[in-house]
Amino acid sequence: MINFNGDLHSKDSFFLNHNNRGLRYGDALFETIRVVNGKLFFWEDHYLRLMASMRILRMEIPMSFTMEFLEEQIMESVTENTLKESPARVRVTVFRNDGGFYLPNTNDVSYIIEASALESPFFVLNAEAYEVELFKDFYVNPDMLSTLKTNNKLINVVGSVFAKENGYQNCLLVNNNKMVVEALNGNLFLVKGNHIKTPPLKDGCLNGIIRKKLIGILENLDHYVLEEAPISPFELQKADELFITNAVVGIQPISKYRKKEYATTVALDLIGKLNAAARLT
């Protein structure tokens, strides 16, 4: 079942049309949230990011869009899809209402909530081979719009096609300053000794929820030194570890980039701490 503005529809129903601004112009935002046994992981962070992003895009935030209201709508969708006692992946999409061309007729919004099953209730480290390559056909523009989770994801789509065509599990994106920004589906962390780097938001990376949580965890660990700083492509092959973070997988280690193979020591250390942080939210 799909939740559209509080009304439940079957997944094969037609409740949107060709005038939808998310379809026509990518005039939409989304949040992907892990929900386990009725608990929304890092829900406050997702909610605050969504509200901040709506303000940046000059969308009108409805008075009803409180944390409690949206949580109720999410849980109704999870329950209707018989996932209340299971791990679930939830996507909340908010888009400006129909009308207008580039200039909208209104800044009012609608929302859609979808829920699907996940295999594990915990973040689990994937030990399978995971090879990446740089995707350099198109570049990320280092500005505030690139940090938002909008529906404008063509570079991620084309990059995913490129990865599949060439036998890679993922690709790393670079900005127009030729610095490594993120992966196709998450933020990037680089480990060298006890030094951990992740690109800063000013380089154009997504303002990721798990990125934020890991930064908070690392800042409280004395045996690691965290730095938010640009990462050049030349640093990748000198690293001991590379890993990707997102709200569904948690931490995804990269096993190979070109001729370099990587360890997973730090990723293994952090996955348990991330699960502990999720349980406390």
Image: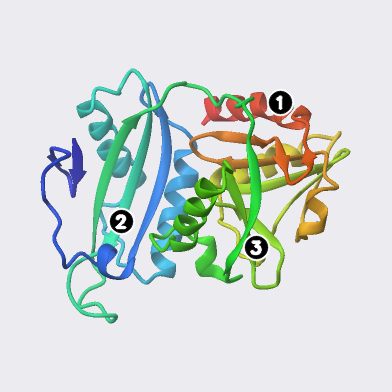
* Badge 2 density bin: few <14, some 14–19, many ≥20, Cα 10 Å: many
Residue positioned most to the top: 85
Q: Is residue 211 left or right of residue 14?
A: right
Callout 2, which amino acid? Answer: Val
Q: Amino acid at mark 3?
A: Val
Residue 117 lies in what quarter of the image?
A: top left
Q: In this rendered view, identify the residue nearer to me: 2 or 225.
A: 2
Quote the CA–CA distance across marks 1 and 2. Answer: 35 Å
Labels 1, 3: front one: 3
Please tell me whether mark 3 sits on a helix, a strand or a loop: strand
Label 2 or label 3, whichever comes before in sequence order: 2
> What residue is at 26 percent from the left and 71 percent from the top?
107
Going from N to C along the chain, the mark reached first, 1 or 3, is 3
Question: Depth-wise, is mark 2 or mark 3 nearer the camera?
Answer: 3
User: Can you tell which mark lies on residue 94?
Assistant: 2
The residue closer to the viewer here, 177 or 161, is 161
User: Is 121 placed left or right of 94 in the picture?
Assistant: right
Left or right side of 195 for 153: left
Q: Check disc 2 and report its element: helix, strand or loop.
A: strand
Q: Is residue 104 above or below residue 44?
A: below
- Dot 3 alpha-carbon crowd within 10 angstroms: few under 14, some 14 to 19, many 20 or more: many
Q: Position of residue 124 (x, y in %)?
A: 57, 24
Q: Quadrant of residue 246?
A: top right
Marks 2 and 3 sit apart, C-alpha to C-alpha, by 28 Å
The spot of residue 223 in percent (x, y) is: 86, 33
- Residue 105, given in percent of the width and then of the height, sits at 20, 78
> On the image, numbered disc 3 is attached to which residue?
174
For the question of whether residue 229 can be seen, the reply is: no
Q: Which residue is mark 1?
A: 268
